[in-house]
């Protein structure tokens, strides 16, 4: 008997999952609960090829079992991280914070016309002020204004060089 893998694969791919489960039962001699079509096709093709050309040798199968038995398996769960910082692993250095070059300096006022209104947003050292409310990002301000997610730099028309266009 010869097996044309491409022809058999095409036939199997056209089958519905129920038909593949039936074919699986024929080929393996036992039913399956699997409903993943790709998995069923691969397993059936593998089994047909193994039947036709022969399965792996008993020596190879035994070697695989030996390797699996020798594998280092974790027998206990990893330790939970401590809530206290590990001072031995801590690193103390000055973190240089760079401002986004697209933003004007703190204290500047961003002005934008939107739906007939003139909107003003003040740039703060750590955030933005709009109508007395402080926001962490320009996108949060834009969302407050428009009611939907919006890129703050795009909404306020800020270029890559900083300030308004």
Image (cartoon, rainbow, N blue to C red):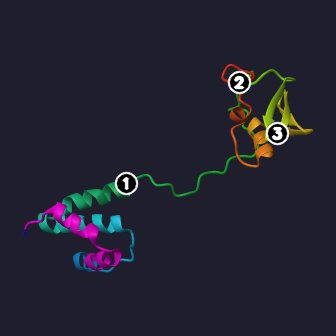
In the image, residue 18 lies in the stretch drawn in magenta: yes
Of all residues, the one furthest to the front in this rendering is 116
Residue at (68, 24) in percent of width and height: 159
Q: Earlier in the sequence, mark 1 or mark 3?
A: 1
Are dots 1 and 3 in contact, CB under 8 Å?
no
Q: Nearer the viewer, residue 102 or 24?
A: 102
Of all residues, the one furthest to the left in this rendering is 1
Q: Which residue is mark 2?
A: 102
State the separation of the CA atoms marked 3 and 2.
25 Å
- Element type at mark 3: loop
Q: Quadrant of the N terminus?
A: bottom left
Question: Residue 141: which quarter of the image?
Answer: top right
State the separation of the CA atoms marked 2 and 1.
57 Å
Residue 28, image x and y in percent? Answer: 25, 75
The reply, left or right, for residue 153 in relation to residue 123 is left
Tell us which disc is closer to us: 3 or 2.
3
Q: Quadrant of the C terminus?
A: top right
Tell us which disc is closer to us: 1 or 3.
3
- Element type at mark 1: helix
Tell us which disc is closer to us: 2 or 1.
2
Residue at (73, 33) in percent of width and height: 87
Residue at (80, 34) in percent of width and height: 113
Q: Earlier in the sequence, mark 3 or mark 2?
A: 2
Q: Which residue is mark 3?
A: 116
Which segment is the magenta one?
A: 2-24
Residue 94, image x and y in percent? Answer: 75, 21
- Magenta part, dominant SS: helix
Neighbourhood count class around disc 3 (C-alpha, 10 Å): few under 14, some 14–19, many 20 upward: few
Q: Nearer the viewer, residue 72 or 51?
A: 51
Q: Nearer the viewer, residue 55 or 79?
A: 55
Q: Which mark is residue 70?
A: 1
């Amino acid at each position: 008997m010869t097996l044309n893998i491409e022809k058999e694969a095409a036939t199997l791919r056209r089958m519905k999952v129920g038909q593949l489960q039936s074919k699986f039962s024929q080929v393996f001699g036992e039913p399956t609960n699997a409903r993943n079509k790709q998995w069923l096709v691969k397993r059936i093709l593998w089994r047909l090829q193994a039947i036709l050309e022969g399965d792996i040798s008993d020596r190879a199968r035994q070697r695989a079992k030996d390797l699996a038995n020798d594998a280092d398996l974790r027998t206990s769960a990893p330790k939970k991280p401590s809530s206290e910082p590990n001072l031995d692993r801590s690193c103390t250095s000055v973190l240089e914070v760079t401002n986004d070059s697209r933003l004007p300096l703190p204290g500047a006022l961003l002005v934008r016309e939107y739906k007939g209104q003139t909107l003003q947003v003040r740039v703060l050292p750590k955030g933005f002020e709009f109508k007395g409310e402080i926001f962490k990002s320009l996108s949060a301000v834009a969302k407050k204004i428009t009611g939907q997610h919006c890129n703050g730099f795009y909404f306020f028309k800020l270029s890559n060089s900083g300030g308004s266009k």
